[in-house]
Amino acid sequence: MARPAPVRVLPAGREALLVELDSAEAAEAFHAEVVRRRARGDLPGVREVVPGARTVLLDGLAGSSDADRGRLARALESWTVEPLHRAEGPRTEIRVVYDGPDLAEVAGMWGVAPQEVAALHSATAFRVAFCGFAPGFGYLTGLPEHLHVPRRATPRTRVPAGAVALAGPYTGVYPRPSPGGWRLVGRMEDPDRLWDPAREPAALLAPGTRVRFVPVEAHG
């Protein structure tokens, strides 16, 4: 059932409004509502929408007056937001070899055998909630709460591109080599797909995208 969204709307410079929500789930639902209304033409002054963990930024309000932004802020606060429909949005598949260095440790936390991690993880319907950390890095939600795992106590100095990793409620795929403290359970077959500046959007895992992981055997 639709409900008023408990939000706080703050100015962010002279061309943006930052919507703060009370949970990650509420932020995902609010972002989906923004996308729907923008597609209908209800937000003509908004050039860019940037979701975060518990925020949604509406940017590009160039030329709008303080009064215009105030009216939009009040409208945002009064929106009725539909519950998040996780089956909506573009869909992509990521082929993964589940042989990460933290696989056995994650299996122990889940109380299953290591070979069962791939089955549990790939059976989950994921959705990109927001992007951050590095270009092309999406924060994917959908993992049941009992499968959430903490970050590593000591981050690695280098995580390879394509590493499939878990931390808290999120799954992520590293688009390039970088330090990282997430737990690595596998590797994507073709990580070059994650970020392509010539593509629109450049990020394969753009906010709102539904993601399925497909287990594959290692070659060689």
Image (cartoon, grey):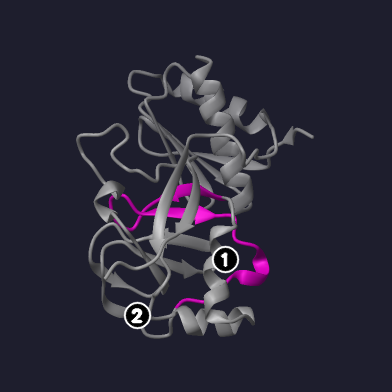
Q: Quadrant of the C terminus?
A: bottom left
* 117 left or right of 195 in image: right
Residue 142 covered by magenta stretch: yes
Q: Position of residue 210 (x, y in %)?
A: 51, 43
The answer to which of 167 and 108 lies nearer the viewer is 108
Whole-percent x and y of residue 85? 65, 38
Query: Which residue appears at 26% of the width and 69% of the height?
Result: 160
Query: Up-down: is 86 above or below 104?
Result: above
Depicted 40 relative to depicted 97: above or below? above
Q: Are marks 1 and 2 in contact (CB under 8 Å)?
A: no
| Circle on res. 119 | 1
The percent coordinates of residue 56 (x first, y second) are 49, 41
Residue drawn at x 48%, y 35% is 90
14 or 88, which lies in front? Answer: 88
Magenta range is 126-151
Judging depth in this view, the residue of 72 and 138 nearest the camera is 138
> In the image, what residue type sits under mark 1?
Ala
Q: Earlier in the sequence, mark 1 or mark 2?
A: 1
The residue that appears at 59% across and 70% down in the rendered structure is: 148
Q: Helix or strand or loop: what does disc 1 sit on?
A: helix
Residue 156, horizontal then vertical, whole percent:
30, 80
Residue 169 visible in the picture:
no
Apparent side of residue 96 relative to residue 136 in the rendered image (left or right): right
Q: Farthest front residue?
A: 220
- Element marked by disc 2: loop
The vertical placement of 122 against 200, above or below, is: below
Q: Which residue is mark 2?
A: 155
In whole angstroms, how far apart are the C-alphas of marks 1 and 2? 26 Å
The crowding category of the residue bearing disc 1, from other C-alpha atoms within 10 Å (few below 14, some 14 to 19, many at least 20), is some
The type of residue carrying mark 2 is Pro
